[in-house]
Image: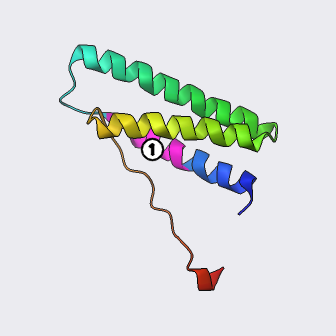
Amino acid sequence: MSLEKLVSKYIASTEHALNKMQIAENSTKTNADSIGKVVESAKAYLQDAKYYRERKRFEVSLASVAYCEGLLDALKMLGAVEFEWPIRKRKRRSEK
């Protein structure tokens, strides 16, 4: 898979997660404000990923979307947000 396709796949996956994400019900007002700031940072990294993809700077785009995914995963691990990553179909080596 080309780096361009990989970046596009990661961006689509991250957009899906952000669209389905909800702040966990057990979050307090203070936590919700902090969670919101982290989510906004994640969205900014996603926009950066799209910006660099359009300019064919795929390495920078991949790094940006990876930062975004890392922030979202950290929030999920802390129980601050709820979402699921889309299921990715994997090809068997014999099918490649």
- Crowding around mark 1 (Cα neighbors within 10 Å: few <14, some 14 to 19, many 20+) is some
| x and y, in percent, of residue 94 in the image | 61, 86
Left or right, 4 with reference to 71: right
Q: Is residue 38 above or below residue 55?
A: above
Q: Amino acid at mark 1?
A: Ala
Callout 1: helix, strand or loop? helix
Residue span colored magenta: 13-22
Q: Residue at x 73, y 53 (%)?
A: 3
Q: Nearer the viewer, residue 28 or 1?
A: 1
In which quadrant of the rendered view does residue 28 lie? top left
Q: Nearer the viewer, residue 22 or 42?
A: 42
Position of the C terminus by quadrant: bottom right
Q: Is residue 15 above or below residue 4?
A: above
Q: Residue at x 35, y 23 (%)?
A: 35
Q: Nearer the viewer, residue 12 or 90?
A: 90
Q: Is residue 84 above or below residue 46?
A: below
Residue position marked by numbered label 1 in the rendering: 17
